[in-house]
Amino acid sequence: MSEKHNDQFYLYDLQVETIRGEKDFVCAHEEGVNFQVVGENLVFPQETRFSLYALAAILPLIPARQRETAGTDWMTTDTDIACPDPNCGARFRITRIAKRSFRHSECTVVPLPRNTKD
């Protein structure tokens, strides 16, 4: 098998949507506002505003949500992230919406070790 064929991996495309939690919004969030994560790109609908502070809280979780996880892993089941303001009731739901194939050789110039099987 050539390196071109065995260097494939998958990532999920994600949607991040603002939802209402148990408390009122304190920050300038709007229910239903969303963006998508497609590969390495954040894709915002035109004229969408999303809090920088909320985005900073969500960003560390995105690469983990993009990858396959065990059914028993909390990253598989816990989809709602709280607004970083403890007084705000906004939540941000991260949903897997599609699975996309990538090739290592198209994402980096670092070669794979010769004995890689995954």
Image (cartoon, rainbow, N blue to C red):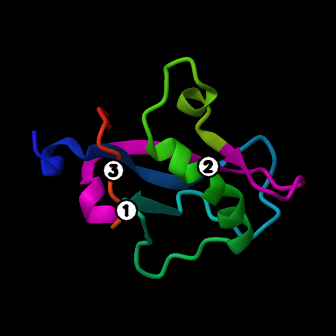
Q: Which residue is mark 3?
A: 112
As shown in the figure, which amino acid type bears the numbered disc 1? Answer: Val
Is residue 83 toward the left or the right of residue 60 in the image?
A: right
* Residue beneath the point at 59% across and 33% down: 75
Q: Are marks 3 and 1 in contact (CB under 8 Å)?
A: yes
Is residue 24 toward the left or the right of residue 75 in the image?
A: right
Q: Which residue is mark 2?
A: 61
Is residue 26 toward the left or the right of residue 59 in the image?
A: right
The picture places residue 65, in percent across and down from the top left corner, at 51, 43
**Which quadrant: the N terminus?**
top left
Circle 2: is it few (<14), some (14-19), or many (20+) Cα within 10 Å?
some
Q: Specify the label residue 110 is tagged with.
A: 1
Depth check, mark 2 against mark 1: the one in front is: 1
Among numbered discs 2 and 1, the one appearing first in the sequence: 2
Q: CA distance from mark 3 to mark 1?
A: 7 Å
The picture places residue 45, in percent across and down from the top left corner, at 41, 73
Among numbered discs 2 and 3, the one appearing first in the sequence: 2
Q: CA distance from mark 2 to mark 3?
A: 26 Å
Give the magenta range.
Answer: 81-108
As shown in the figure, which amino acid type bears the numbered disc 2? Answer: Leu
As displayed, is residue 58 above or below residue 46? Answer: above
Circle 3: is it few (<14), some (14-19), or many (20+) Cα within 10 Å?
few
Q: Specify the label residue 51 is tagged with.
A: none
* Residue beneath the point at 78% across and 67% down: 27
